Image: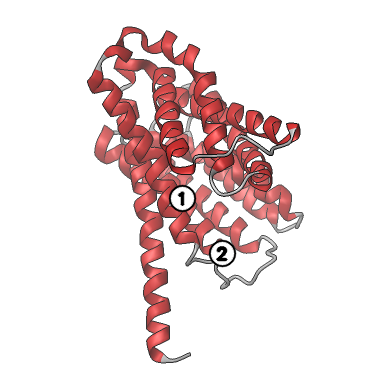
Amino acid sequence: MPAARFVTARSGSTSAVALVLVGLACQEVGASLAVLLFDEVGPLGMVMLRLVFAAIVLLLIARPSLKGHSRAAWWAVVRFGLVLALMNGLFYLALERLPLGVTVTIEVLGPLTLSIIAARRASAWLWAGLAFLGVVALGGGGWDRLDPLGVAFALGAAASWALYILASARVGREFVRLDGLALAMAVGAVLSLPFGIADAGGALLRPDLLALGAGVAVLSSTIPYALELSALRRLAASTFAILMSLGPATASIAGFLLLGQHLSVLEIAGIALVIAASIGAVLMAPRARRQDEPVA
């Protein structure tokens, strides 16, 4: 490879990594801002604001066609929208009771478990065991330190994230570009309306809270998705997955800096073990393409 081409490729990969890291940072800043708004609109009110504004932005960008889709395709969109609403609802309900870093770490167990099951290799159980040790350590030496209901919500969010991956793949096969995601986000927004209105009440009439809700939607959904989509054009799928495994670390940093949430040494060790398990599962997973082959 000519030197100039090598430098260009290396520069492109470096900038793509930076895009993913910025996307992760935006996502956790958005989550931190959402936590700060819980006293005003409640967790379910925040879910509604995030989904409604994210749906509006995606519908304006994608402008999906409503014609030419089968009944099965529409049912796939409805199921995807239900999973989106459920995943976000459980995540924010967990955030109300648990530190941001702990919540995200437990949530990561969903896709991690899915990847371990899909691997169908004996070595996958090594990463499962490592993740289990991480979860035990998250209790900081005693699970009584963590709100049991918050842990249950976070585990529900983890299961929903695994369902999200499966539902997203199905919708991606039925719809082009962002059409399926935009329509599913709209379904999720509609499903969240009664719960969000009941939780937020009159606060929804305040323009400042609506503006902050829109900011959460942009930070947590629009910006990260756009940056990740751009990065995927220049990064190997395995590299991208490893970077996304750093979510619990960025969440812990955001929780500490923005929310004043301190973690014990054992909790930090637990987060590190779950990250290591995620990276190991990615590296050992069977791949159809070479590790250094970027996604188209």
Query: What is the quadrant of residue 36 in the picture?
Result: top left
Judging depth in this view, the residue of 23 and 100 nearest the camera is 23
Q: Residues within 10 Å of mark 2 (few under 14, many from 20)?
A: some
Query: What is the quadrant of residue 82 in the picture?
Result: top right
Question: Percent x, y for residue 99?
Answer: 38, 31
Q: Is residue 253 left or right of residue 243?
A: left
Determine whether 291 is above or below 49 in the image: below
CA gap, disc 2 and disc 1: 28 Å
Tell me the SS state at disc 2.
loop
Q: Amino acid at mark 2?
A: Val
Q: Residues within 10 Å of mark 1 (few under 14, many from 20)?
A: many
Q: Amino acid at mark 1?
A: Ala
Q: Residue at x 62, y 56 (%)?
A: 281
Query: In which quadrant of the rendered image does the C terminus lie?
Result: bottom right
| Residue occupying the far left of the picture | 208
Question: Tag 1 or tag 2, which sits nearer the N-term?
Answer: 1
Q: Residue at x 39, y 48 (%)?
A: 24
Q: Residue at x 75, y 34 (%)?
A: 72
Residue 32, disc: none
Determine whether 80 is above or below 291 in the image: above
Q: Residue at x 56, y 62 (%)?
A: 237
How did the renderer colour the structure?
secondary structure
Question: Percent x, y for residue 92?
Answer: 44, 26
Residue that mark 1 sits on: 272
Q: Is residue 240 visible?
A: yes
Q: Is residue 252 left or right of residue 109?
A: left
Question: Percent x, y for residue 241?
Answer: 53, 56
Judging depth in this view, the residue of 226 and 283 nearest the camera is 226
Question: Percent x, y for residue 182?
Answer: 52, 37
Residue that mark 2 sits on: 295
Q: Is residue 31 visible?
A: no
Judging depth in this view, the residue of 264 and 149 nearest the camera is 149
